[in-house]
Image (cartoon, coloured by chain):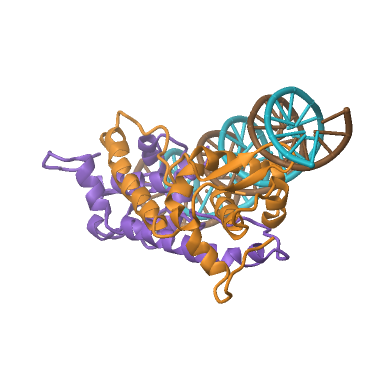
Chain colours: A purple, B orange, C brown, D cyan
Amino acid sequence: MNASQQFAVSVHILTVLAASREQVLTSEEIAGSVGTHPVVIRRILGHLRAHGLVESRPGAAGGWRLEKPPAQIVLGVVYRAVNHEAVLVMHQHPNPGCPVGARIQPALAEVFSAAQTALEAELAHYTVADMLGKVFPLESFQGVE
Amino acid sequence: MNASQQFAVSVHILTVLAASREQVLTSEEIAGSVGTHPVVIRRILGHLRAHGLVESRPGAAGGWRLEKPPAQIVLGVVYRAVNHEAVLVMHQHPNPGCPVGARIQPALAEVFSAAQTALEAELAHYTVADMLGKVFPLESFQGVE
DNA sequence: TATATTGTAACTATAATAGTTACAAATGAA
DNA sequence: TTCATTTGTAACTATTATAGTTACAATATA
C-alpha cells in the first residue's frame, strides 16, 4: 500500500457515527463496517478526538460518538486531523553548489503550498452531512444500528 | 521516505534544462545538481519524454534537452507525467453488508476526484519558465553551464 | 575502433502503513 | 465487590513503495 488510507477511513467512520446519531458505537462495530482491525480504528479516532470531532467513553457500555452535528464537521478539518505531511514533498539533497540546486527548494515550496491550499480548500466544501446524503440519497433516513 | 519526490525532482530537472537552454546535459550532470543517482534521473526523464516534454540522444555527446520552450511546459502536465496514483486513496475492504460500507466508495470517489482536480488546476497555473524566474529572480539571466 | 551515453532490468536498503497481539486502566452491571 | 467490557497504547510483524545501486546491451560520435 502506498499512500495513507486514513482520510478515507476517517470519513467512513464519521459517516457511520453520523448514521448512528446519539447512540455510541464501539471500535469493534466501526471496524466491522470499515473492514479492518479495531486498533486501527481507535488510532484514527484518537486523532479525530484530538481535533474535537468525536468523543469517547471507556469501560463497559463505552464507545464513540460525534462531538458536533454532521453538518458542522468539514472534511478539510478531518483531512488535517489525520494528515501531517503535505501531499507534494521536496527532494532531499539538491546541490547547493549549483545555482539551480541552491535555490530550487524555496521556489518549489511556493508552488507546493499553493497546491496544498487548493486541495484543502476543495475538501472544505464538503461536510459529514454531505457524505451521509450521498450514502443515503433517496430514503428518508432514520438511522442505522 | 513516504510520498514520492519524483514531482519535485522533475521540476528541478526541467528548470536545470531550461537554464542550460539548447545545450544538452547528461543524466550525470543533472544528477549532480539534483543530488541523486543518474539512473534515478534517467527513469524520471523517460516519463517526461513519454509526455513530450524532453528529448534525448544516446551515445557520445548525447544527453537531454527540453522539447518545448519553458513557458509552454505547465506543471500540471509534469505532475501527471510522473504521478499515476491519486493523492487521496480509498480504503480497501468496506463491508458490503453495512449500509454505509456498501455505498461509501462512490461517495468518496466524488470528493477525491474534486480534490485531485483542484490540486492539478492549481499546478496548471505555473510553468517551468515561472520556476526559472523564481530561481533567478533579479539577474538578467544568461544561462548556466 | 574507442569512448561516452542512453535505456533498462534486477537487486538492495530504507521507510511508511496496516494489521496484530498484549495488556493496563477505566467503567458499568451483577 | 467482582466480573465483563471497552478504551488507550505500546510493541511487534508483514507488506509495499521508493530511492538508490549495479550491471550491461544498444547507440552514437569522433
Left or right: B12, with B27 as reference point: left
Q: Quadrant of the C terminus of chain B?
A: bottom right
In the rendered image, which quarter is residue C11 located in? top right
Q: Does residue A56 appear in the picture of this structure? A: no
Going 29% across and 46% down the picture, which residue do you hit? A15
Front residue of A121 and A34: A121
Front residue of A4 and C25: A4
Going 36% across and 54% down the picture, which residue do you hit? B121
Task: Tell me where residue A143 appears, x and y as whole percent.
Answer: 19, 43
Left or right: B90, with B12 as reference point: left
Point out the residue furthest to the bottom here: B138
Q: Is residue B4 above or below residue A73?
A: above
Count of picture labels: 0
Q: Does residue A139 appear in the picture of this structure? A: yes
Task: Tell me where residue B61 appears, x and y as whole percent.
Answer: 72, 43
Task: Tell me where residue B35 appears, x and y as whole percent.
Answer: 70, 54
Going 59% across and 57% down the picture, which residue do you hit? B21
Front residue of B35 and A69: B35
Going 31% across and 29% down the picture, which residue do you hit? B96
Q: Is residue B145 above or below residue C22?
A: below
Front residue of B77 and B3: B77
Left or right: C2, with C14 as reference point: right
Task: Tell me where residue B45 appears, x and y as whole percent.
Answer: 59, 43
